C-alpha cells in the first residue's frame, strides 16, 4: 500500500457506542499502550495507575456511552486503523494540572492529545490526516481554536509509543502554528477557525 491510498480511502467518525467494538479492536489487548485506553489525560496519575488496564478500559467504555465522543476513529476500508483523542481542554484534568503544558492564555480551546495508529499503518503519513480530521471534528462542534502538544524529535530516534501526542511536522502540515515552546522537545501549536 502507498501513502496515496491512505490519502484517498481513510474515513473518520466520532467514537460513539456503536463504534466501541472497532475502538476495542484497534486498541487491542494492551489498550493501545500499556493499558492506557486513552485515559492518561483524563485522570490523576494515582487513579490512572490504580485502574491501568481493565479499569481504564471500563472507564473509556463508560465515557463513550455518555454520547459525548471522546475522539475520532479512522478507517481504511472497513478496518479501524487510527484514533485521536480530541475535546475541550477542560475535559482533561491532567493537562489542566501540567506545568509544562499549562494554558498560554484564557481562551477556550479544544485539545488534540493522543494519536494512535495501528502498527501496520505507521510511517505512511497517516498522522497528518488524523490531526486534520480531529481539527475538522472540533470545528464542527463549535471550537474556534484547536491546540496540540506535539514533539520535536530532531535527529533523535524515538519509539512510536512515546510520541503519542504527535509530531510537530504533522501539525505543521495541517496548518498549525507554534504558539509556545515549553521545552526543548515539546511545542504548543494552534489552529484558528
Image: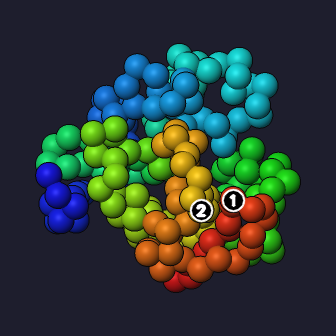
Q: Nearer the viewer, residue 78 or 163?
A: 163
Q: Nearer the viewer, residue 127 or 113?
A: 127
Foreground disc of the pair 1, 2? 2
Identity of the residue furthest to the front in this view: 155
What colouring method underlies this structural image? rainbow
Give the answer, above or below, for where 108 lies relative to 68: below
Do the residues under discs 1 and 2 have CB atoms within 8 angstroms?
yes
Mark sitting on residue 154:
2
Q: Residues within 10 Å of mark 1 (few under 14, many from 20)?
A: few
Q: Nearer the viewer, residue 138 or 18?
A: 138
Which residue is found at the position 46% from the left and 32% from the top?
32
Q: Secondary structure at mark 2?
A: loop
Mark sitting on residue 50:
none
Which residue is found at the position 47% from the left and 27% from the top?
31
Q: Is residue 39 left or right of residue 5?
A: right
Give the answer, above or below, for where 67 lies relative to 187: above
Q: Residues within 10 Å of mark 2 (few under 14, many from 20)?
A: few
Which residue is found at the position 75% from the left and 62% from the top?
184
- The answer to which quarter of the image holds residue 144 is bottom right
Q: Is residue 29 left or right of residue 90?
A: left
What x and y, as percent, mark residue 113?
58, 53
Which residue is found at the position 34% from the left and 34% from the top?
26
What x and y, as percent, mark residue 13?
32, 53
Mark with earlier residue (1, 2): 2
What x and y, as percent, mark residue 153?
59, 58
Task: Quickly name the residue at label 1.
Answer: 185
Give the answer, above or below, for where 1 lies relative to 132: above
Identity of the residue furthest to the right in this view: 99
Count of marks overlaid on the render: 2
- Quote the CA–CA distance across marks 1 and 2: 8 Å
Q: Secondary structure at mark 1?
A: loop
Amino acid at each position: 500500500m502507498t501513502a496515496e491510498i491512505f490519502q484517498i480511502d481513510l474515513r473518520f467518525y466520532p467514537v460513539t457506542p456503536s463504534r466501541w467494538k472497532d475502538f476495542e479492536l484497534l486498541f487491542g489487548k494492551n489498550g493501545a499502550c500499556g493499558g492506557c485506553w486513552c485515559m492518561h489525560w483524563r485522570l490523576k496519575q494515582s487513579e490512572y495507575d490504580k485502574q491501568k488496564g481493565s479499569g481504564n478500559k471500563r472507564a473509556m467504555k463508560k465515557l463513550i456511552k455518555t454520547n459525548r465522543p471522546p475522539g475520532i476513529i479512522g478507517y481504511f476500508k472497513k478496518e479501524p486503523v487510527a484514533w485521536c483523542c480530541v475535546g475541550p481542554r477542560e475535559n482533561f484534568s491532567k493537562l489542566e494540572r501540567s506545568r509544562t503544558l499549562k494554558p498560554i492564555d484564557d481562551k477556550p480551546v479544544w485539545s488534540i492529545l493522543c494519536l494512535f495508529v495501528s502498527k501496520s499503518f505507521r510511517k505512511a503519513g497517516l498522522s497528518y490526516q488524523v490531526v486534520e480530521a480531529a481539527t475538522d471534528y472540533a470545528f464542527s462542534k463549535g471550537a474556534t481554536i484547536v491546540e496540540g502538544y506535539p514533539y520535536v524529535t530532531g535527529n533523535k530516534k524515538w519509539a512510536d509509543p512515546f510520541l503519542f501526542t504527535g509530531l510537530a511536522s504533522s501539525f505543521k502540515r495541517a496548518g498549525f502554528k507554534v504558539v509556545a515552546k515549553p521545552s526543548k522537545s515539546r511545542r504548543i501549536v494552534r489552529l484558528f477557525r
